[in-house]
Amino acid sequence: MSLSIRNQLPGSVTGITAGEAMATVKVRLDGGQDITAAITLDAVKDLGLTEGSAVRALVKSTEVSLATGRVEGLSIRNQLAGTVDDIATGGAMASVKVSVPGGELTSAITKDAVTDLALAPGTSVVALIKSTEVSLATA
């Protein structure tokens, strides 16, 4: 299956916390960073997820925000450190490629945000991703 989602980071499930309808699934990415996905219990069962399961964390580029450092006092659990590799700008929007250990993320943000954050290749950034915006696929 081909997908338009470019952000696909491989990893392994390290923990599953089940609620009544939803679960949080912690994944150790191949690059060593951790990411949490909030998915339905049905998805956990359908994918056959257990600790140690090989998965890919999938995130649309429009759901990846960027900061120039770690952010405290925020409900967003997923903060992945990386470095800007490339920026392609248009009239209003920009596509920012960020190298993270074990892979690459693309963030679709406004051109104004690129300017305000003074982003350029080599800039250290933190990718912020809500756990509800992380999907999982089995490898």
Image: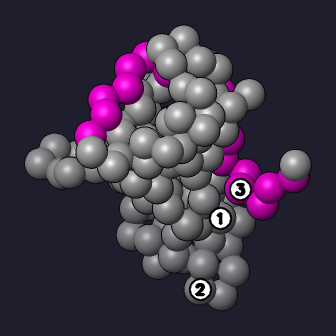
Name the residue type under label 3: Ile
Q: Which region of the structure is painted magenta?
A: 2-19
Please tell me which residue lies in front, 72 or 135: 135
Residue 14 inside the magenta-drawn segment: yes
Q: Is residue 20 left or right of residue 137?
A: left
Residue appearing at x 74%, y 28% in the figure: 139
Q: Residues within 10 Å of mark 1 (few under 14, many from 20)?
A: some
The residue tagged with tag 2: helix, strand or loop?
Answer: loop
The residue tagged with tag 1: helix, strand or loop?
Answer: strand
Residue position marked by numbered label 1 in the rendering: 95
Residue 86: mark = none
Name the residue type under label 2: Ala
Front label number (3 vs 1):
3
Residue 5: mark = 3
Residue position marked by numbered label 2 in the rendering: 92
Establish if 73 lies above or below 45. Answer: below
Q: Tell me where residue 65 appears, x and y as whole percent.
A: 43, 59
Which numbered disc, 3 or 1, marks the residue that appears first in the sequence? 3
Disc 1 to disc 2, C-alpha distance: 11 Å
Q: Tell me where residue 17 appears, x and y as whole percent.
A: 30, 29
